[in-house]
Image (cartoon, rainbow, N blue to C red):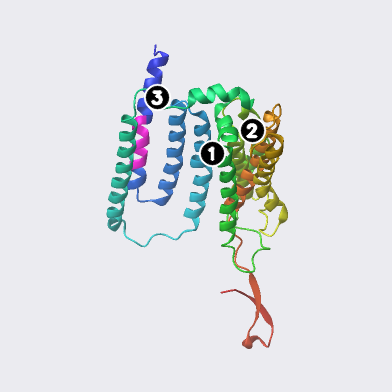
Amino acid sequence: MMTAIDFGLAADLILAVSIPGMALWLILTRERFRAVVGFMIYGLFVALAWMRLGAPDVALTEAAIGGGLVGLLLLGAHARVPPDPTPPGRRWPLHVLAALLSGAVAAGLAAVVLMLPDPAPSLAATVADALPATAMDNPVTAVLMAFRAVDTLLETVVLVLALIAFWSLVPEGAWSQRPTWLSLARPAPALVLLARLLPPFGLLVAVHLFWIGTSQPGGKFQAGALLAALWALTMIAGLSRPPAPVRRLPRLLAVIGPAVFFAVGLAGIWLAGDFLAYPSGLEKPLILLIEAVLMLSVGAALGLVLAGLPPAAQTPAVSADDGGRSRAEPRS
């Protein structure tokens, strides 16, 4: 009977072979659809590797983003990008170059890890000593929301700036149009059934991930990514319509998280003597408040990006050959 140690070693060996093998297959495959599916499988393998390394927070993020949302974006891009006219035989230099660059990066990372002193430098003991002051049992949440709260605040602002940059590509005059990039013309009945059944359970899982983030692996980003994925699923199945960029509620949801985070940080100057410092006894309630609104902002921002851009606006144009009657022509 296989012992727990043997099972762990077998799992590590499988991951050690599967991850480089899948990466090599992604580089060498000639079909984009297979590459996209392989990328999603690769993301799941990496998530399992993070679990084996004892980093469940990173594993949850990788599964939600690398294996989920990014894969969904790649699938949508594959369905809309025309076939590559370049013969497959002429693309091998790019594949070789990508393989060499990937191998060089992997070798560099391996060299850095192998050259670390023994024991490796770590701030884990310092974080553990200061953990009671944050009222957090999860050290990852404590680091993100207390010890390096400024970095986390700036990361949430970057997400809003990314949405603004994405919306800067909206065609002229199409701000009042709903995006049509994500929805399918004829979704399969099984997909529609899945989109009806999953959201209630997924919503409970998202709230659970948010709530346990203070004491166990989870938190606002994983919960927000799950909300975005559920929203995208309903849009794909045609059960919900994506909002137009001009709508105010999606904009409010996207910015409310960083705004509340910044407001709490400013209040800390008067209440606790420093920016983003929490008053004694209110650490956990304030962190939960910030994480709750950030969960909504992350879900809204990612969902709006997944929804895509609205199509080019149709404007009436008068043609000389129709007796002065107007007809709609796309804007150039």
User: Would you say the residues marked 2 and 3 are in contact, meaning their CB atoms lie under 8 Å apart?
Assistant: no
Check disc 1 and report the residue beneath it: 64
Residue toward you, 316 or 9: 9
**Residue at image x 41%, y 59%?**
83
Q: Which mark is residue 228?
A: none
Q: Main secondary structure of the magenta part?
A: helix
Where is residue 291, by image quadrant?
Answer: top right
Label 1 packing within 10 angstroms: few (<14), some (14-19), many (20+)? many
User: Would you say the residues marked 1 and 3 are in contact, meaning their CB atoms lie under 8 Å apart?
Assistant: no
**Residue type at the position of mark 3:** Ala
Residue toward you, 119 or 255: 119
**Residue at image x 47%, y 54%?**
78
Q: Secondary structure at mark 1?
A: helix
Instruction: Give whichever of discs 2 and 3 has the lower sequence position.
Output: 3
Along the horizontal axis of the image, is 272 left or right of 163? right
**Residue at image x 68%, y 55%?**
243
**Residue type at the position of mark 2:** Phe
* Residue 91 colored in magenta in the image: no
Q: Quadrant of the C terminus?
A: bottom right
Q: Secondary structure at mark 2?
A: helix
Q: Residue 257: percent from the left, percent from the top?
A: 66, 44
Q: Is residue 68 visible?
A: yes
Where is residue 325, by image quadrant?
Answer: bottom right
Gap in Å between the C-alphas at discs 2 and 3? 29 Å
Gap in Å between the C-alphas at discs 1 and 3? 22 Å
Q: Residue 194: percent from the left, percent from the top?
A: 62, 40
Check disc 3 and report the residue beneath it: 11
Image height check: is 68 above or below 328?
A: above
Q: Which residues are magenta?
A: 16-24
Check disc 2 and report the residue beneath it: 210
